[in-house]
Image (cartoon, helix red, strand yellow):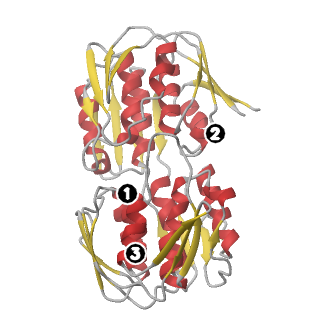
Amino acid sequence: MDKLLITGGQQLSGTLTVSGAKNSALPILAATILSDKPVSIGNIPHLHDITTTLELLGCIGVDISIDEKLNIEINSNDIHNLTAPYELVRTMRSSILVLGPLLARFGEANVALPGGCAIGARPVNIHLDGLKKMGAEIRVENGYIHAKASRLKGCHLVLEQITVTGTENLLMAAVLAEGTTVIENAAREPEINDLANFLNTLGADISGIGTNVLTIEGVKRLGIENLHYDVLADRIEAGTYLVAAAITSGSITLKNISPHLLDAVLEKLKEAGAIIETGDDWISLDMQGKRPTAVSLRTAPFPAFPTDMQAQFMAMNCIAEGTSTVTETIFENRFMHVQELQRMGANIKLESNTAICTGTELLTAAPVTATDLRASASLIIAGLVAQGETLVEQIYHIDRGYDHIEEKLSQLGAIIRRIPR
């Protein structure tokens, strides 16, 4: 497997353009199954998970091409296979997002139970319970979800807990259902809003976008001639580079990103001592050469502090002035990066779902192993300030969620290179 070698000690500075959001692109690609007209999707990041999703769509019969502007052209009118195989689904939890669209449009779907990052239990029961209430017959046998419905029926759904992929799957299923569907306790992440806006552009009737109650009036078909849609910018990629600049006492500007997507993150960076300036589609951070101040945080669903930024802030707190507490409320197994940061000299103690971190002026390089996507980012960030050369192994995780991270960090002055397998 490829590895990343990082020589610490470089202060980051410069300008970057933020890529499209993986967490928008994946559900929107799945949603193209619902369209009976070809669609063009732009601002797609170059990621392993995107490749896997396109392979999955191709496997079920979707016709895919890429034009000269790197837009992905998708035609879902020749779908002939309603099975998402384990070989593809096992590598990526979001593969389950084809379940709702296949069932809604074709009346049947067979989807392998998903795999993905080992950051804790993310059960699919909420997806399945919702589809059952909409009239689907569902069996789970031999590692596959088998779902059938002549046509789904609109109903009132109250989700027992906030779930992003559950909200997305049920939203996509509801747009072609007969009647009205109301989803209460819906997740409110910007990527869900992006999916809903895309579906409305296709001809769906969704209201309540941006709130925790979504109302969907079912329609008989979806599809618009010559439709092009650009996915949202990646707020987690943006946040990761902002933290990378902060930990190195640097100064950067990010383009193609709305600051409102990162309100909670920007507030914590200000707490850490960063000077933040923003425009309609840009964010700048300047630490003025200063060491960050430790910041305490607690993860929670949007619009609160995102779990996907917890590991990056943990890395920053390792060298910050003062002591911080980081409490993880979303995933019960999302502190696997802690023991790797400790190998680099971090002073972190775990108490249940809270990490207590006392900042130290110096981290030392060590070979470390990435355990999940955001843990990978935290180890790279720590390597940027560690004394010596940090070798990050199992970086296939990072390739699932960051578009050419070593190239972008190099543009900002980091000394980082990929070592091929």
Spot occupied by residue 132 in the image (x, y as percentages of width and height): 40, 75
**In this rendering, is residue 136 above or below 280?**
below
**In the structure shown, which secondary structural element does the residue marked by tag 3 occupy?**
helix
Spot occupied by residue 387 in the image (x, y as percentages of width and height): 53, 9
Q: Amino acid at mark 1?
A: Val
**In this rendering, is residue 248 above or below 285?**
above
**In the structure shown, which secondary structural element does the residue marked by tag 1 occupy?**
helix
Horizontal side of residue 321 vs 112, given as left or right = left
Q: Between disc 1 and disc 3, whose residue precedes?
A: 3
Spot occupied by residue 82 in the image (x, y as percentages of width and height): 62, 76
The N terminus sits in image quarter: top right
Select label 2 or label 1 by which is in front.
1
On residue 132, the disc is 3
Q: Amino acid at mark 3?
A: Lys
Can residue 99 be seen by looking at this rendering?
Answer: yes
Disc 2 residue crowd, few under 14, some 14–19, many 20+, Cα 10 Å: some
**In this rendering, is residue 11 above or below 153?**
above
**In this rendering, is residue 181 above or below 369?**
below
Q: Amino acid at mark 2?
A: Tyr
On residue 164, the disc is 1
Residue extending farthest bottom: 220
Select label 3 or label 2 by which is in front.
3
Q: Residue at x 55, y 55 (%)?
A: 114
Q: Which residue is mark 2?
A: 396
The C terminus sits in image quarter: top right
Q: Between disc 3 and disc 2, whose residue precedes?
A: 3
The answer to whether mark 2 and mark 1 are in CB contact below 8 A is no
